[in-house]
Every structure is written in structure tokens, then in C-alpha cells.
Amino acid sequence: MTMLSERVSQSAFDGSRLRVVLLLDLQDGAQQRFLTAYEHMRNQVAAVPGHLSDQLCQSIENPSQWLITSEWESAPPFLAWVNSEEHVETVRPLHDCVRDTRSLRFSILRETSGVHASATATRKAVGGLQPFPRVGDGVVRHALTFTVKPGSERTVAEILAGYTSPQAQVDDTTRLRRTTLFMHGNRVVRTLEVQGDLLAALRHVARQPEIRAVEEAINPYLVQDRDLDDPQSARLFFTRAALPAVHHLAPAGTPAEDVERHAILYPAKPGCGMALARFLAGQDEVAADLPGSHIDSSTVFQRDDIVVRLVDVRGPLDSDPPAAVGALGPRKPAVLTKLLDVEALGLDNSSPDEKTMLRLLENAQMRLITDRRAL
């Protein structure tokens, strides 16, 4: 019998097939433009490695409501595609056709074929099933990252630290739990914890005057220009800034109180971002089984070659440098440094011993700007 996990967990790296569901509400009169855009998009997606199939569905009750489902061999190839500039350009025509969209992603846990299903259809499935149900805590974790113009870091940090927190309760089922901001050089990372609907929470935050004032205040310092009054410009900025959580691990039950939150930035070598995130996820799984580990929980965020690892630790972060940077055991520091762009962290390619891991930790640790918890 398969044992259920006793830890709160989510992972893009369990090897199971992925079902992606995109819900759309079309604008009046946009049906033909939407169908044209979809035909272009599906031909592009069909050529993406890891893509298995997709379906376009229209509601039998409300013709303005549509559904696009797609199946993928596993989560990593889908995430690589959906976070790419190619995807941004491919879906751009859809945005002019829809009032609202919502994307949902699911690992496939169980599957049943009908008694009349053809052998060909049965054999078409590629990839595994989710090995066992994961334990959740009702919290969605997400992050945003962007860069600011060199020389503006202190000003931006002051603006970001001084904002007024928005109302935590979004609706009857959604609540902002925690927002934490970090900086490393001119890179900003904002991590979010939301109980309930992430999209509803993001829209709620964007509508708050105090948040809008902060976003307007940092606009002149952004490397990527944006116009918050232009929906297309704002959408593109936040699409490119999205830093999805690809792995999370924490003890089940009430979160510990005696922990401190830290963020570590891992710039990957070109093309190694997903492999680096997978490596760190595996290391955190190992650390979770070690008695006396000072890491209480961890979340790995990844987009392209930017990887950020959020860790809640007991005691000093540097009390166990290999565990803190995610390189436990023989040869693991060497694997980590092979995936890392060490020069971007101001390091050389010297022997990856514990002293090197301590220097890596010192150079990769992000500076905490503000940590806000809902009351």
C-alpha cells in the first residue's frame, strides 16, 4: 500500500503527468477572433517538447464561457514553456478577446479508461501518475521578481519597506497570509502566501490605493518599463515578473513560531534553471528526514535561470552552511556549483568545500526589506 506523506508538500518534480485547465470568459463579438488566435496558439504549442494534447471546449449553458485543457508529460516542460518569452508572444492575441481568464494546474493521481476505449487511446498516455496524495495546508505560495536601475537600490528599498499593508481579508474564502520582500543587488523578490484563491488575492492587492501608490513610486526605477494605466503593459510586466513555486516542504500542523525567514538567490548557468530547482528540491527532501535539522520549511521558486529558495530556520542560518545552501552530503556541493553561475555571485571555481559553501551562502543570501503577516 502506498503511504501518504505526513508533510505539507507540493512539487513539480514527481514525474507525474500534468493537466492544465484554462477557463476563459470571452468578450461580446470576439468569438471569431478568439478561434483564429486559438488555431495559431495550438499549432505553436503542439511543437513544444512534453506537450501531449489539448482540447477546446465551449459551455453548453453560456456560449461566452470557454475551456482549454492540455496534457503534458510532466510539469517541468510545461513550466519552461509557460514562463518563456515565446509563450508571452503566442498568447498575446488571446488577451484582446477575453474578459477574464483563470489557469489551473493538476498532477494526475488516478485514471480510468472506459470499457469501450480503444487500445490506441489507452496506449496514448505518456508519463506516470502522481505517486500518492500530497498533504496541503490551504496556502498558495507565489513570488514576483524584477530588477531596478543600478544606483536606485536604497531608494527602492525605502519605498518598498514603507508601504501600508492592505486589508488581509479578500472575500469569504480568500485571505492574505504573509508578504515578504527581499533584495539582492538590484533584484527585488516579493513572496506571497495566500489562503484561498491566488488570482483573487492578486487582484484585490492591485486595487488597493496604498499598493498602487507604491507601484507608481517605483515605476521610474524599474529596468523594464510599465504603464499601470495600460492593461496590456501591466499584464506583460507581471507575467514576466512571475516566479512560481515549484517545490514546497513543511511539517504538517501549526507552523513553528521560533523560526526566522531567509531567502537565497541562485543564478543558474544558462539553461540550468530547472535542473538547479530540481536539485534543491531533492536536497530539501533529504534534509527534512534528518533529525535535528535547523531548516523547518522551504519553498523553491524558479523562472528561467533565476531560482530563489525561501527557508524558515531555527537559529542562525549559517550554523550549517551545506544544509542552508542545499548541498548536503559528499559531492553535492560540486553538483550545486556546476549548476550555478558562481561568477554572478562574486565567487570563483575553487574547490567546493564547506568554506566555499559558507562564502556562497554569504554572497547569495538576500537582504530582508519587510515581512508582513496578517493579523
Image (tube, rainbow, N blue to C red):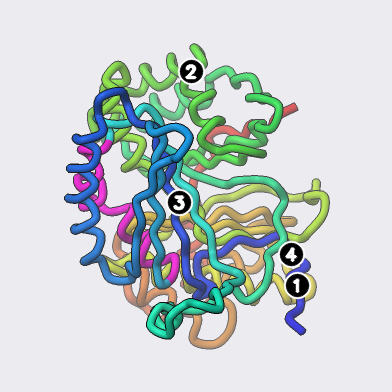
- The dot on residue 21 is 3
Q: Residue at label 4?
A: 7
Q: Name the spot of residue 295 as percent of width and height, x first.
A: 69, 62
- Report how far apart the C-alphas of labels 2 and 3 lie in the structure: 26 Å
Secondary structure under the numbered disc 4 in the rendered image = strand
Task: Tell me which label, 4 or 2, sits earlier in the chain.
Answer: 4
Q: In which quarter of the image is the N terminus?
A: bottom right
**Location of residue 260 with respect to 171 vertically, above or below:** below
> What range is drawn magenta here?
74-94
Q: Is residue 271 above or below residue 222?
A: below
**Which disc number belongs to residue 207?**
2
The amino acid sitting under disc 3 is Val
How many residues crowd around disc 3 within 10 Å: few (fewer than 14), some, or many (20 or more)? Answer: some
Q: Which amino acid does label 1 sit on?
A: Leu
The disc, 1 or 3, on the residue closer to the chain's N-terminal end is: 1
Nearer-N-terminus badge (2/3): 3
Which mark's residue is nearer the viewer, 2 or 3? 3
Name which quarter of the figure residue 375 lies in: top right
**Secondary structure that dominates the magenta span:** helix
The span from disc 1 to disc 3 (Cα, nearest Å) is 26 Å
Q: Which residue is drawn at 69% across and 47% down?
A: 138
Residue at figure coordinates x 25%, y 59% from the top left? 45
